């Protein structure tokens, strides 16, 4: 497989990029989607979260109240660390299983991870970063995703800096323009992606 890392700050447009890569034929391993899967009711992770944070983080329909939990953890670094300690190991196991399934194929596998830089992972053939000015990311999170400005800024502050991400990038996708312009950059990057060396 050709393993490509994809990262970018919250609100950067990473989901748009991974969706286009999937359309082009890549196998996308999406850490955010896996996180939601392992937090479903009935899982060990769900039980551990409720045990740690209380019944208040359960929504009326019995699922995890993700906004409510986020309000707790993004206001307190210790609480965020506790949540990550529950969730990250389970997500890591699932990612490893999906990569193992693709290991003996010729597929382009895109590992879509918000905290790729923070993880220190360095086994990718190349890393792509979706770049957006943090102030514009705050604006988009408030305008299109219903975040408060304080919440948006708190989440951005918990991630790697723009500079740290760009320092790790083998290719940068600039999302300061339109969705169409971003998708065009993905299309232009596709031959370059396919030319990367397979991961041994």
Image (cartoon, rainbow, N blue to C red):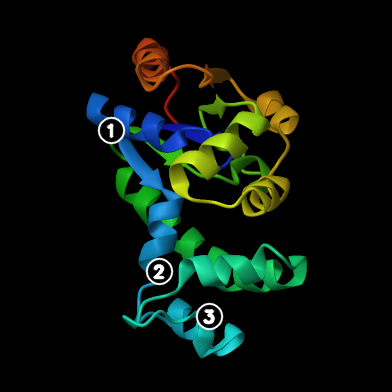
Q: Which is nearer the N-term, disc 2 or disc 1?
A: 1
Mark 1 to mark 3: distance in Å?
A: 31 Å
The residue lying at 59 percent from left, 42 percent from top is 116
The residue lying at 67 percent from left, 62 percent from top is 74
Residue 195 higher or lower than 150, as above or below? above
Marks 1/3 in contact by CB < 8 Å: the verdict is no
Q: Which circle marks residue 38 in the picture?
A: 2
Residue 143 image position (x, y, % from top left): 49, 40
In this picture, residue 36 sits left or right of residue 123: left
For this rendering, which residue is in front, 121 or 101? 121
Which residue is denoted by mark 3 in the rendering?
49
Mark 2 to mark 3: distance in Å?
A: 11 Å
Residue 61 image position (x, y, % from top left): 31, 80
Residue 66 image position (x, y, % from top left): 47, 67
Which residue is denoted by mark 1 in the rendering?
22
Tell me if residue 107 can be seen.
no
Q: Secondary structure at mark 3?
A: helix
Marks 2/1 in contact by CB < 8 Å: the verdict is no
């Amino acid at each position: 497989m050709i393993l490509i890392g994809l990262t970018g700050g919250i609100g950067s447009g990473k989901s748009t990029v991974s969706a286009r890569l999937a359309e082009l034929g890549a196998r996308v391993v999406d850490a955010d989607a896996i996180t939601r899967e392992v937090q479903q009711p009935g899982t060990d992770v769900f039980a551990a979260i409720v045990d740690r944070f209380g019944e208040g983080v359960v929504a009326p329909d019995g699922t995890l109240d993700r906004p409510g939990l986020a309000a707790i953890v993004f206001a307190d670094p210790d609480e965020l660390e506790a949540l990550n300690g529950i969730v990250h190991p389970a997500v890591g196991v699932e990612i490893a299983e999906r990569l193992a399934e693709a290991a003996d194929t010729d597929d382009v596998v895109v590992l879509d991870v918000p905290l790729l830089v923070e993880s220190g992972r360095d086994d990718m053939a190349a890393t792509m970063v979706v770049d957006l000015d943090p102030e514009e990311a705050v604006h988009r999170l408030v305008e299109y995703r219903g975040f408060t400005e304080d919440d948006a800024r708190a989440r951005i502050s918990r991630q790697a800096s723009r500079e740290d991400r760009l320092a790790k990038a083998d290719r940068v996708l600039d999302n300061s323009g339109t969705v169409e312009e971003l998708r065009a950059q993905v299309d232009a990057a596709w031959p370059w992606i396919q030319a990367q060396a397979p991961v041994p």
